[in-house]
Image (cartoon, rainbow, N blue to C red):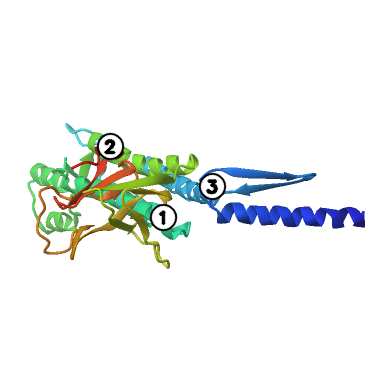
C-alpha cells in the first residue's frame, strides 16, 4: 500500500503541473472543463469563467426571488370609476430597491471586471425608474380606516353642522396618496424583471465573456484602451488594450468607457467615451461600448471623430 501511494505521487505532481500550464496559457475557455487522465488518476479543471458564472447566478437568482416576492405583495387600490392601481410610492420604491439589490448582488461576487455589468444594470433600471416618475398619476386615495375629506363633507351635509369637531377631523385626515394604474405599473415592472432575468440568463448559460474585435478608419494601427464603466467596491478595474485592427478574448460583458488614439505624424487623434467636458460635437455622437446589447465588433472613425458598433469586420470602412 505504501508503494502504491509513492507511485501515485508523481502522477499527482504531473497533473498539477499540467493544470497550471493550461491555466497559464489561457487554454481554458469560459464555461469549459478540462479532464486529465493519468492512469487511475483523473483531474478535472474548471475554468475561472465557469466559477464566476456560477457565483453570479446564485446571487442574481436570490435578487430575482426578492423582486418577485415584493411585487406580489404590492397592495391593489380600487377607486370607483378608475382602473385598479398600486400606490405610486410603493411602485417607485420597488424599482429603486431592485436596482440597488441587483447592483449589490453583482458586487458581492467580488470580480472587478463585473463593474461593466453592474453599470449596465444600474443604467437600465435607472432609465425605467425615470419613466415611472414621469408617468401621470391616475388617482388619489386615502388609506383605509381613516377619515377622508369626502366623508367629512357628507357628514356636514347631513347634519348641517360644521363645528370644530368636523374641522379637526378634516385637519387630521392624511394627504391623499397618489397611485399608478396597474396596467402601466406592471409594464414598467415587467421591464425591471427583464433586466434581472437577462443577467441571470447570461450567468446560468455561462455566457459572461465575449471576444471583442476593434477596427479603425484609416486602417493604420491605433490603440484602443477600455475599462468597465462601473466599479466594484474595494477593487480597481483592469484596463484592457487592443491594437486595431485586432481582438481580445474573454472580455466580460457590460458597459465600457474607452480611449482610442491614432497617431498621425506629430498629431494624435483621440476619440473617447464619455466625451470630455467641453469637447466639440462630432458629426455623429460616439457610441458607448455596450457588450450586453451591442455587437462584439467596434469601429473607430478618426476622421469623423466617433466610434460605433458594427455588425462585422467588413463594415468597418471609411
Residue 184: give x, y in percent of width and height.
23, 37
Specify the quadrant that holds the C terminus.
top left
Chain-order first, disc 2 or disc 1: 1
Horizontal and vertical percent for residue 156?
10, 47
Q: Earlier in the sequence, mark 2 or mark 3?
A: 3
Q: Secondary structure at mark 2?
A: helix
Q: Secondary structure at mark 1?
A: helix
Cα separation between marks 3 and 1:
14 Å
Residue located 49% across and 46% down the image: 57
Q: CA distance from mark 2 to mark 3?
A: 32 Å
Q: Return the residue at label 3.
A: 50
Rendering coords of residue 10 (x, y %): 79, 56
- Residue 222 visible: yes
Q: Which residue is mark 2?
A: 314
Q: As rendered, which of 236 and 133 lies closer to the eye? A: 236
Identify the element where label 3 is drawn.
Answer: helix
Q: CA distance from mark 2 to mark 1?
A: 30 Å
How packed mark 2 is, by other alpha carbons closer than 10 Å (few <14, some 14-19, many 20 or more), is: few
- Give the labeled residue for mark 1: 114
- Count the labels in the image: 3
Q: Is residue 144 visible?
A: no
Amino acid at each position: 500500500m505504501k508503494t502504491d501511494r509513492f507511485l501515485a505521487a508523481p502522477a499527482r505532481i504531473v497533473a498539477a503541473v499540467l493544470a497550471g500550464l493550461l491555466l497559464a496559457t489561457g487554454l481554458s475557455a469560459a464555461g469549459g472543463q478540462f479532464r486529465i487522465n493519468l492512469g487511475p488518476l483523473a483531474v478535472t479543471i474548471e475554468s475561472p469563467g465557469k466559477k464566476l458564472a456560477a457565483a453570479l447566478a446564485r446571487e442574481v437568482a436570490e435578487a430575482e426571488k426578492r423582486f418577485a416576492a415584493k411585487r406580489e405583495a404590492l397592495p391593489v387600490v380600487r377607486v370607483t370609476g378608475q382602473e385598479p392601481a398600486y400606490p405610486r410610492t410603493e411602485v417607485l420604491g420597488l424599482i429603486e430597491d431592485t436596482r440597488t439589490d441587483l447592483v449589490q448582488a453583482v458586487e458581492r461576487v467580488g470580480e472587478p471586471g463585473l463593474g461593466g455589468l453592474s453599470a449596465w444594470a444600474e443604467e437600465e433600471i435607472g432609465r425605467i425608474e425615470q419613466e415611472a416618475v414621469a408617468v401621470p398619476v391616475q388617482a388619489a386615495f386615502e388609506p383605509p380606516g381613516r377619515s377622508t375629506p369626502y366623508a367629512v363633507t357628507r357628514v356636514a351635509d347631513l347634519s348641517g353642522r360644521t363645528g370644530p369637531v368636523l374641522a379637526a377631523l378634516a385637519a387630521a385626515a392624511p394627504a391623499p396618496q397618489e397611485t399608478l394604474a396597474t396596467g402601466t405599473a406592471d409594464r414598467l415592472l415587467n421591464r425591471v424583471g427583464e433586466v434581472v432575468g437577462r443577467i441571470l440568463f447570461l450567468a446560468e448559460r455561462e455566457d459572461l465573456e465575449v471576444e471583442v474585435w476593434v477596427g479603425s478608419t484609416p486602417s493604420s494601427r491605433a490603440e484602443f484602451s477600455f475599462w468597465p464603466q462601473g466599479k466594484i467596491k474595494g477593487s480597481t478595474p483592469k484596463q484592457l488594450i487592443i491594437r486595431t485592427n485586432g481582438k481580445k478574448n474573454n472580455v466580460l460583458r457590460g458597459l465600457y468607457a474607452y480611449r482610442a488614439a491614432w497617431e498621425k505624424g506629430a498629431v494624435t487623434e483621440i476619440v473617447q467615451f464619455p466625451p470630455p467636458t467641453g469637447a466639440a460635437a462630432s458629426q455623429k455622437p460616439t457610441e458607448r461600448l455596450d457588450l450586453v446589447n451591442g455587437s462584439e465588433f467596434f469601429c473607430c472613425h478618426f476622421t469623423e471623430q466617433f466610434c460605433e458598433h458594427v455588425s462585422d469586420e467588413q463594415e468597418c470602412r471609411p
